Image (tube, helix red, strand yellow):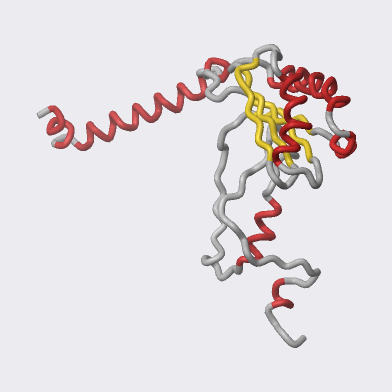
Amino acid sequence: MFTHFFIDRPILSSVISILILLGGAVAMWVAPISQYPELAPPQVTVEARYPGATAEVIANTVASPLEAQINGIDNLLYFNSVSSSSGNVSITVVFKPGSDPDINQVNVQNRVSQALPLIPQVVSQQGVTVEAFQPGTVITVTLNPLRNGKNFGAMANGARLIKCGSTIPAGGCTDKTGEVFLQSRDGFGTQRVQQPGQ
């Protein structure tokens, strides 16, 4: 019954829709950004590499001393560590929403510096990186080689260009989903490679 009122009057429905749209546009410009709530808590990642070490060895000799020092930092919610058989360890430290990411990064960096004498010297020489980031997806880019006549190699080169936006203010690294099986490691252009015998 109520819906038929608007179905029978399409001009009135259009005017109401336009007014709602204009009201949202005005509210978007008037509402201060500081009023928007923090959706995702700020995070700091600690990454290290121990060449030739197994996941168990790197968890005991690198991750464990780092975790012992990181535990108890101001505004800490929790942390998660992942050790891989390739000799990499990654510790994600999650802080309370609203806390300052720069202060969080400095606090974690100070704790990591305290743990450096406790970890193997090989790891210290290669460096332990500490980076702050705000999780969330800003944009999703899809590279489809089946459109516009491109091949997988050309798409792989394009994907390398957008791998990390750390040069952009407040930009972070990207994640790649899917695999690229063809790569070109020579200095030839794609047109030259596609013409055999020259």
Q: Where residue 63 sits in the image (x, y, percent)?
A: 73, 30
Examine the rendered structure and indicate whether residue 131 appears above or below residue 111.
Answer: below
Examine the rendered structure and indicate whether residue 124 appears above or below residue 67.
Answer: below
Image side of residue 189 versus residue 95, left or right: right
Q: Tell me what residue is drawn at x 20 percent, y 37 percent.
A: 10
Q: Tell me what residue is drawn at x 57 percent, y 37 percent.
A: 138
Q: Where residue 150 sits in the image (x, y, percent)?
A: 59, 68
Residue 50: name its quadrant: top right
Q: Quadrant of the N terminus?
A: top left
Q: Tell me what residue is drawn at x 27 percent, y 35 percent.
A: 14
Q: Tell me what residue is drawn at x 60 percent, y 17 percent.
A: 77
Residue 190: name its quadrant: bottom right
* Of 79 and 133, the residue lying toward us: 79
* Of 25 and 104, the residue lying toward us: 104
* Of 27 and 44, the residue lying toward us: 44
* Of 197 and 83, the residue lying toward us: 83
Q: Where residue 25 sits in the image (x, y, percent)?
A: 45, 28
Q: Quadrant of the C terminus?
A: bottom right
For the image, the number of numbered tags is 0
Residue located farthest toward the bottom when viewing the structure as drawn = 197
